[in-house]
Every structure is written in C-alpha cells, then in structure tokens.
Image: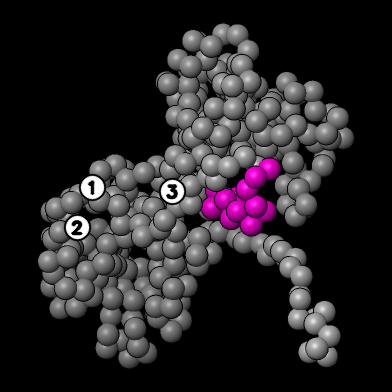
Amino acid sequence: MTVPTYDKFIEPLLRFLATKPGEVRAAEAHDATASMLGISEQDKQELLPSGTQPIYKNRAGWAHDRLKRAGLSRSPRRGYWQLTEEGRKFVTSHPSPLTAKEIEQLAVGFMDVRLRPPLSGESLAAVAFVQPVEQAGSIASPDERLGEALAELRRSVAGELLEVLATVSPSFFESIVLDLLHRMGYGASRSDLQRVGGSGDGGIDGIISLDKLGLEKVYVQAKRWQGVVGRPEIQAFYGALAGQRARKGVFITTSGYTTQAIEFARSVEHIVLVDGPRLAELMIDHEVGVSARTVKVPKLDSDYFDEELT
C-alpha cells in the first residue's frame, strides 16, 4: 500500500494521543499512527521528493498541525505533542469513528487559523496571510494552488518558530535576536552585535554598532514573554536608552503589546517594537533558524520558439 494522505492520519493520531495522560514524543506518535493505519516498514522508508523526511512522518505532522489549529492538540515543547482539554472533550463526545464530514472539517476547516496569536492589543505583523482558495482543487489554477501551499507552509513554520522560541533560554533568545538583526544588515560583522543581557543590564540586552568606530549604536531589548508587554515596560526601556544617551532602540518579544504600549512607542522617536508574529516572519524571510529549498517551476519560454526573433 502507499502512504495515505494526511487527512487519514487525523483520527488515528487523535485516538492515540487520547490514550496518553500527558505529553508524548512526536516520533512515538508518528510510529503509533503508522501502525494503526497498517503502513508497512517498506512504505515507511518512502521519502518526500526532497529526500529530507519519510512521507509518513510528514503527513502525521500535518495531521497534528490540523489538530492544533482546531484547538484539540498542542506542542508543549519541541518534539512533543499533547491533547488539549478541548481535545479530550472532543474524543469523549465522539466515541465512534469520525464521519467523513467530520474528518474533512478537521482537515480543511481550520486552515486559516493562526497559531499562537498575540494575546491582546494591536498586531504589529504587516503580513497579509493568504486565505485558502475557496474553489475546489480541480477549479483552482496550479498557480493558485502553489501559492496557497506556500502560504500554508509559511504559516505552519511561523507557528512552529513561536513554539520553539517559547522553550529556549532567555540568553539564547537574546543571541537569536542578534543573529536575526545581523542577517537583516545591522552591523558590518556579527562581532558588531554584542549581547549584554543579565542582571543589572539596565533593560539593555544587546548593542549594535552601526559603524566600525561604534559612534552610532542601536540598543536592543529581547524578552521571551508569555504575557503581553505593557506601557510600563516600554517606558522603562525608553528610560534605559536615555541613561545610555542612546537615540535608537528595538524592543522584541515573542508575545504582543498592549495598545497603550504601542501608542507610547509611537509618541517617542526611534523606538521600534517587534511582536511574536512579526519576529517569526522576519526569521523566515532571513532564514534564521529556518532552512529553505529551491523549487523549480517550469514555464514555457515562448521567445525561444519565436522564429522571427531568431
């Protein structure tokens, strides 16, 4: 048999996770789901066209992505899956096999749900997420389907990035932020970006020298927070900048900002706020903690066949 499509993984994965009182390793869930579907050892060796991952693991991962978007599961830490309380209630209320319509709803009904949205306040992410094409797959053009697939992959990776960032240490998060800023073109070399976070840092976690002599600097505060950042934190950062006689500052968090915090930052000069969704987008764009592969899309070269041009 060939490896089933990812929608066929949804119910077995849901039932397996329901047997576990706590979190379970994703690798264990992959194999348990494959066993429940009767996937042979030979079929488990089949790889994606890129050769980077077994197909069954990829499809189990997409099934879990759908359960997360439906609010039925979560990733408490990197490489681990766990049903939410809502997920356990769903399993209890659906003891019989799910209907085809229920599977379809889980597979495609929550594709536009963004994982880990800002807890409150305004969104700073200037990204227009592409919504799924409403047309049936046979009606939508290949270009539309390709664009939708790329947008979906981007949304999924952004959600995974925020989950991973929530688990790293504060010091490592500060280093990630400086790596990102360097990839974005700040500092002539990586050594021009210095991490200074720690006790007594005065609200400054990093310093970027924009020129070789260090005459112009940008000060950075990077906070891996669960709750939203309020106006008092931004005011304290502004005060720290004044204490350093600094003119430019960047405040980056994995969560979001209250409206009052955003309004204060806009009322003063040279403070830039970056929230979790925007941070994930920047990491994808500049390939920090993210790898990308080139996909060749064939297109007829009509000029080649124009005899009048030859």
Q: Which residue is mark 3?
A: 162
State which tag comes first along the sequence, 2 or 3: 3
Residue 253 visible: no
Disc 3 marks which amino acid? Leu
Residue at x 55%, y 28% (from the top left corner): 106
- The secondary structure that dominates the magenta segment is helix
Q: Are marks 1 and 2 in contact (CB under 8 Å)?
A: yes
Disc 2 marks which amino acid? Ile
State the residue in front, 48 or 23: 48
Residue 243 image position (x, y, % from top left) = 13, 72
Specify the segment rendered in magenta: 138-152
Whether residue 153 sits left or right of residue 176 in the image: it is right
Q: Which residue is mark 2?
A: 262
Crowdedness of circle 2 by 10 Å Cα count: few (<14), some, many (20+)? Answer: many
**How many labels were placed on the picture?**
3
State the residue in front, 274 or 143: 143
Q: Which residue is mark 1?
A: 121
- State the SS at label 3: helix
User: How does the figure colour the protein chain or chains?
Assistant: one colour
